[in-house]
Amino acid sequence: MNPLKKIYCRTFQTGLKIALPFLPYRKPKIVGSVKALPEVIQKKKCSKVLIITDAGIRKLRLTRRLEKALTDAGIPYCIYDKTVANPTTDNVSEAVEIYRNEGCDCIIGFGGGSSMDCAKAVGACIVKPKQSLAKMKGILKVHKRLPLLMAVPTTAGTGSETTLAAVITDAQTRYKYAINDFPLIPKYAVLDPKVTLSLPPFITATTGMDALTHAVEAYIGNSTTYGTRKDALLAVKLIFENIDTAYTDGSNVEARRNMLHASFYAGCAFTKSYVGYVHAIAHSLGGEYNVPHGLANSVILPMMLESYGEKIHKKLSRLAVAAGLADETTPCEEAAGQFIQAVKDMKKRFGIGDKIPEIQETDIPKLAHYADKEANPLYPVPVLMDASELEPYYHMLMEEDSDTEDQREDYSDTPRNIGKEGDTEHDGTGN
């Protein structure tokens, strides 16, 4: 990256960091069960609910408990269930039409990052009917209070239930972009482990590693605060303690609950401290090839951590201590290496390969441009890189990997959107 661009990026990031204490960040109120939502809706004097989800969620009947609770409380509702992985502008338009035609006045995003991001974008379109989603791209373009927005994550990974971001893909160009503004933070986050019990093992793994990526990128960046560091460390601790149990014993309610809380805290961390190039590259792959976001993050994370080198050894050593991999007396470089190796070992246990076979060499300049445009100047990464410096990472991801292909085939047999996240996710400003 040329020196002038570096100065611009770091100046921009420093300005945001200085402004952090004065910005209206907030954490959603945590609700422990979908059965508690009717009381919230009645208290807010809402009359009809739009539930935004996807076909896979409906097929698994995961919305059944919520629907029964609403019916028993006499609260009318309608459902939009056509959200796709990497939700599109078409999804948002269709859901907005239902919201208006049905006379709804509150929204529940129910599912992975896709459904929650779609729900946020619908809320933004409702309050800004004359502005296109493309014109809301970037930072602080919504600035209007949304209808009551509640999020029910069915994966422990995207963190979209905590963030100010909605990641949307243009249905025509396949360009994926983030809308970032404080009104997009849901009022309530429903961390109900029962809606995650049917999550298949591979999606449990990739979404769990998505949450790990959120925590790690937030922690190693240059715009951390005491609160975001605390949240990131707690998220890493919970993930290392629970992800293997959730993967091997999906019916373990305690492990599922702990993973949901890990995802929540990781989301709180990156909402303020942002993510980095892992997410920027993953978003470009999701937009162009529909690669599931959690899977892309899982593949890219250790590669990017190694590339940052000694710049992040001290921070990685603290993450290693939180993960139970090292102690305070372990030399920083050694502890950092242990953390990176633990991430690689985790990938291996879960059958996650090191490549993204969908990548076409002719697409790489465009993909790198998208990643550069998303990340710079917003993401306070440890080492700045422009598009030309990001291109080699795409080449590193290109070689065919049969293990990844086998897992991708297994993944395609499950309802796809359950494992998405939007950046978000959304998942940073891009979850």
Image (cartoon, rainbow, N blue to C red):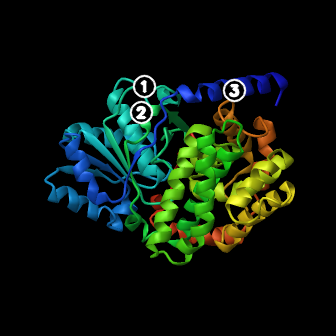
The residue shown at (61%, 50%) is 232
Which of the two labelled residues, at mark 1 and mark 2, occupies the earlier sequence position? 1
| Residue 153: x %, y % from top left | 43, 56
Of the residues shown, which amino acid type is indicated by label 1?
Answer: His
Residue at image mark 2: 183
- Image-based side of 348 in relation to 122, left or right: right
Residue 148, percent from left and from top: 31, 39
The tag earlier along the polypeptide, 3 or 2, is: 3
Q: Which residue is mark 1?
A: 143
Is disc 3 in contact with disc 1, using a CB cutoff of under 8 Å? no
CB under 8 Å between callouts 3 and 2?
Answer: no
Front-most of residues 188 and 184? 188
Is 321 positioned to the left or the right of 119 in the image?
right
Badge 2: few (under 14), some or many (20 or more) residues near its Cα, within 10 Å? many
Q: CA distance from mark 3 to mark 2?
A: 23 Å
Q: Are marks 1 and 2 in contact (CB under 8 Å)?
A: yes
Q: Dot 3 surroundings within 10 Å: few (below 14), some, or many (20 or more)?
A: some
Q: Residue at x 56, y 74 (%)?
A: 245
| C-alpha span from label 3 to label 1 | 23 Å
Residue 171 visible somewhere in the drawing: yes
Q: Is residue 46 left or right of residue 262?
A: left
Task: Farthest residue to the left: give it.
Answer: 74
**Amino acid under disc 2:** Pro
Secondary element at tag 3? helix
**Helix, strand or loop for disc 1:** loop
What type is the residue that disc 3 sits on?
Answer: Thr
Give the percent coordinates (x, y) of residue 4. 81, 21
- As drawn, the residue found furthest toward the front would be 329
Give residue 381's mark: none
Q: Which residue is mark 3?
A: 14
Give the residue displayed 37% in from the left and 59% down from the top: 55
